[in-house]
Image (tube, grey):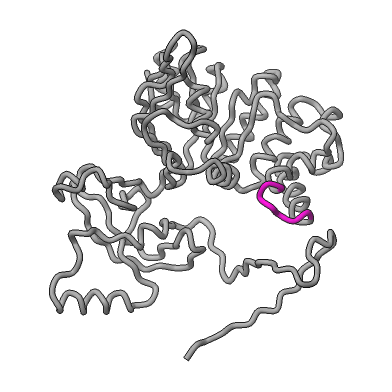
Amino acid sequence: MLSRTMWFVTLKNPDEILAPGMTAYVNVILAERKNVLVVPNAALRYKPTEMSPKGTGDTQKAKKERKEPNTGVLYVFENGEPKAIKVTTGISDNRFTEIVSDELKAGDKIILEESKAFCKSSRSRWSNGKTLLMNEVIQITQLTKNYYTDAGEVCVLKGVDMTIQSGEFVAIMGPSGSGKSTFMNILGCLDKATAGEYFLNQTNTSSLSKNDLATLRNTVIGFVFQGFNLLPRKSLIDNVALPLVYAEVSLHERRERAKMVLKSVGLESFGTYLPTHISGGQQQRVAIARALVNHPKLILADEPTGNLDTKTSQEIMQLFSDLNEKEGITVVLVTHEPDIAEYAKRLVNFVDGKIQHDGPTARMMEKAQ
């Protein structure tokens, strides 16, 4: 017997985008959770090929386990081998699934897929398998970037390895020509590496098309630039709402969400102003609001205080700190200024395309004194 549910949806159509006979798709939210542990659905679908059940008894047992509601099996990478963990699951949005039991902890290494390059022996495969930490936003392995000029090949990044966990606040420093700007462009999916792997929010960016990269960039990352990059003839509300246009969000929802994030940065009453009618510090707050409007997991800030005075710079950096500590948003910023880098909890220093230092900011600053 099939069970069917019929939904009657009422929606506002002030712009008359929808007309009789047109088809519209509606997301119906049945439940919502915040601040919970989730895993990619790929992890719940994954099963090691050499660990398939053997024999009738094992097969029947596996089938029985699969029939249990709200349960699943994850494989974690432990001591060089896969280990099965049975978990209790909660709600899912078809991309991620909530884990409500205590067997899995944030930071456990779960297996999403096996490396096709290592299939001759199980030990070599598992010791070289593609595993991701559950709470990693960024995972970079042997990242290399070369540029080709009339004078020959120039290697800008040379085998960079880096992992950034969810909720970290990372400052990136280095002299001009050290590779930090190129590195940030790759982090922001604005450029692709010549070699190596870059996983952003559990997605391998090297295999994505330009359109898929744009979608990932628009849903995961919020950008803040030194020059603000605001549209001078558009109101602050329209500037903040711009990423939602690319996400095909309705006009009404765009404006409401823009007003909310402008309020969060202290500019609620300035929504109808043009960028030229407010100060530089206020313009940077608008740029931060624009970065937040899509609820990003990651904010990339490139010299966000470069055009601001000392007092305004401190206010902007305190805003970044609050977003990191209170909202749990991962922040990665490039800066030349040590006093700005001190707001971050982790400092990465680039020299000649390589990471010279990667550690707590306070410890690095003590060595510099």
The answer to whether any part of residue 364 appears in the image is: yes
Q: Residue at coordinates 51% horizontally, 29% vertically from top-left?
A: 344
Looking at the image, which is closer to me, 50 or 150? 150
**Quarter of the image that includes the C terminus:** top left
Image spot of residue 208 (x, y percent): 47, 43
165 lies above or below 150: below
Residue 247 colored magenta? yes
Q: How many marks?
A: 0
Image spot of residue 8 (x, y percent): 70, 79
Left or right placement of residue 88 versus residue 212 in this view: left
Q: Residue at coordinates 38% horizontally, 19% vertically from top-left?
A: 354
Image spot of residue 275 (x, y percent): 81, 31
Looking at the image, which is closer to me, 67 or 327? 67
Res. 291 image quadrant: top right
161 lies above or below 176: below
33 lies above or below 302: below
Q: Residue at coordinates 47% horizontally, 37% vertically from top-left?
A: 168
The answer to whether any part of residue 329 appears in the image is: no
Q: Residue at coordinates 78% horizontally, 65% vertically from top-left?
A: 18
Residue 69 colored magenta? no
Image spot of residue 292 (x, y percent): 64, 43
Res. 103 image quadrant: bottom left
Left or right placement of residue 146 versus residue 4 in this view: left
Q: Which residues are magenta?
A: 245-251
Left or right placement of residue 107 versus residue 283 in this view: left
